[in-house]
Image (tube, rainbow, N blue to C red):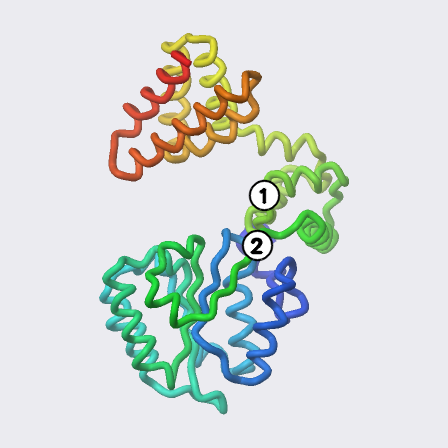
Amino acid sequence: MNDAALWVEKYRPQNFDEVMGQKEIIPRVKALVEQRNIPHMLFSGPPGVGKTTLALIIAKKLYGQDWRQNFLELNSSDARGIDVVRNEVKNFAKTKAIDEVPFKIILLDEADALTKEAQQALRRTMETYSGSCRFILSANVSSKIIDPIKSRCALFKFKPLVREDLEALTEKIAKSEGLNVDSDAIHGIYDTSEGDVRQMCNILQSCAALSKTISVWQVQQLRASIEQKGVTEALEYAIKKDFLKARSKMLDTMIGNGLSGLDIIKQMQKEVLRLDMQDDKKLQMIERCGEIEFRLVEGSDDFVQIEALLAFMCRL
């Protein structure tokens, strides 16, 4: 398996008991499936923690071999407009299930990317076709889902995998793929992935492409990426009040790596905490990072806002 995405599919859990890190959620969902009657559900939580996997397990346990005929998965990031709800979703929802279970399941992955108009149309669709279809909505940020949809769903909040679970899964994949990963490297993989299984698979596969023996040094090389080094150097110039060098280094990092202003801000916010300076100044920097991020989300120019942030840091 040379592709990290294939690793994710290969090691995707097939039963409730195999899902790691969601001990509060699994018993509740399993009980609903055993009753063969589930409500509309909203799965919220960070990426790579098992939301889509759990939805697939629900479908497979309810329908067995016929699960593909009774299950529709749509990614709202690709198709986020009202036409998708009016056409694809509604056409699938209004037909009866081909099984003993009297309803079909529609999984709307990344539902928080749906436009407000699409969510309003979805609200009505969920109500009209609740007898023949159940909806499972997966969202990274549940606050972007409108309240009328939330009130129609049972809410399940997913957590990032804890260290023990992710490291156990890393060891399992490494053993299956014939990799020799030392314990320090496993700890480093967890620190980098921050509980995201997909990210863990990406890191493991990237290291395995170079050698079957994975050391902590290889993992650290991935963590100390070009982007991180560039941002760190720019911040160091800024706190030394050398604005021109800080500006030049930051713009080179952005343009050379095709990064947006939001990418840079998120990396800067992490690096500020590692700087050798007074805590009150770190707080002011982080506060200003939040303000600049808001401006970027509202449509401000990336380069102007990053320069403004560096200027503030130089003055500070």
Residue 177 appears in view: no
Q: Position of residue 284 (x, y in %)?
A: 44, 23
Q: Is residue 183 above or below residue 89?
A: above
Residue at screen point 60% across, 62% down: 12
Q: Is residue 20 left or right of residue 272?
A: right
SS category of the residue bearing label 1? helix
Q: Which quadrant of the figure has residue 25?
A: bottom right
Q: Which residue is mark 2?
A: 159
Q: Quadrant of the C terminus?
A: top left
Q: In front here: 289 or 306?
A: 289
- The mark that comes first in sequence, 2 or 1, is 2
Q: Badge 2: how crowded within 10 Å, few (<14), some, or many (20+)? A: many
Q: Is residue 275 above or below residue 92?
A: above
Q: Which residue is mark 1?
A: 193
Q: Residue lying at the far bottom in this picture: please name it.
A: 100
Q: Position of residue 219 (x, y in %)?
A: 64, 35
Q: Amino acid at mark 2?
A: Lys
Q: Which quadrant of the figure has residue 114?
A: bottom left
Q: Amino acid at mark 1?
A: Ser
Q: Which mark is residue 98?
A: none
Distance between mark 2 and mark 1 Cα atoms: 14 Å
Residue at screen point 47% across, 89% down: 99
SS category of the residue bearing label 2? loop
Residue at screen point 25% across, 32% down: 300
Q: Is residue 115 above or below residue 280?
A: below
Q: Which quadrant of the figure has residue 293?
A: top left
Q: In front here: 235 or 199?
A: 235
Q: Position of residue 168 (x, y in %)?
A: 72, 52
Residue at screen point 47% across, 31% down: 267
